[in-house]
Amino acid sequence: MIVVFTIVAAVAIMLVLWWFNADISSKRPRSGDVAPPFALPDQEGITRSLAEFQGKWLVLYFYPRDDTPGCVEQAMRFRNSLRDLDGLGATVCGVSVDDSRSHAAFARKYSLPFALLADKGGLVAARYGSLRHLGLVRFATRNTFLVNPLGKIAKVYRGVNASRNADEVIGDLKTITKE
């Protein structure tokens, strides 16, 4: 009897997790879509919105947690690539469900000169199909969106590799801006 209950409970949990993830994935924006709007506080408490980046390329990258190995690597690679990104007319913003205070400590520790947006409620991550639930724990998945100067998504990078993401974005920006 206990074995049957355990199996039923495990299946129920798997179905709930699948439902949360299926619901999020069905809302994923694609290349060519208008970028979902956002207004989130950065590490300084300043509200940043999609509208302020009109006329520029925006690299909007979602990451799971501040100060974790993959997130540190991805942020530092974007930091180290800022000269190239600036030269291509692009601005970088990172987004996670951590709060502004956590972002401020993360930015200070690694000298990150770009905005880290605090999506505490996970609403923006959900709009971008980048929110995952593991039971009661939720976090942003490592996805990146390249938004063109008109506010449309030019390229979507799903499940990115933290060590290659900045280089991929730069390569694609070089190709796109030459066209």
Image (cartoon, grey):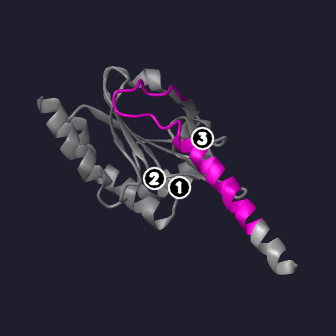
Residue 89: horizontal and vertical position, in percent?
24, 31
| Marks 1 and 2, how far apart at CA | 7 Å
| Mark positioned earlier in the residue sequence (1 or 2) | 1
From the image, tell me which residue sits under label 2: 142
Magenta residues, start to end: 9-38
From the image, tell me which residue sits under label 1: 64
User: As drawn, is 87 to the left or to the right of 50?
Assistant: left
Depth check, front residue: 95 or 157: 157
Q: Nearer the viewer, mark 3 or mark 2?
A: 2
From the image, tell me which residue sits under label 3: 119
The amino acid type found where label 3 is placed reads: Asp
| Mark positioned earlier in the residue sequence (3 or 2) | 3
Reply yes or no: does residue 175 show up in magenta: no
| Point 44% across, 34% down: residue | 29
Q: Is residue 30 visible?
A: yes
Q: Is residue 46 visible?
A: no
User: As drawn, is 32 to the left or to the right of 25?
Assistant: left
Label 2, secondary structure: give it: loop
The amino acid type found where label 1 is placed reads: Pro
Depth check, front residue: 19 or 133: 19
| Point 81% across, 75% down: residue | 4
Residue 45: horizontal and vertical position, in percent?
59, 36
| Mark positioned earlier in the residue sequence (1 or 3) | 1
Dot 3 crowding, Cα within 10 Å, few <14, some 14–19, many 20+:
many
Reply yes or no: does residue 17 show up in magenta: yes
Which image quarter: residue 7? bottom right
Depth check, front residue: 66 or 37: 37
Which image quarter: residue 47? top right
Dot 1 crowding, Cα within 10 Å, few <14, some 14–19, many 20+:
many
CB under 8 Å between discs 1 and 2: yes
CB under 8 Å between discs 1 and 3: no
The amino acid type found where label 2 is placed reads: Arg
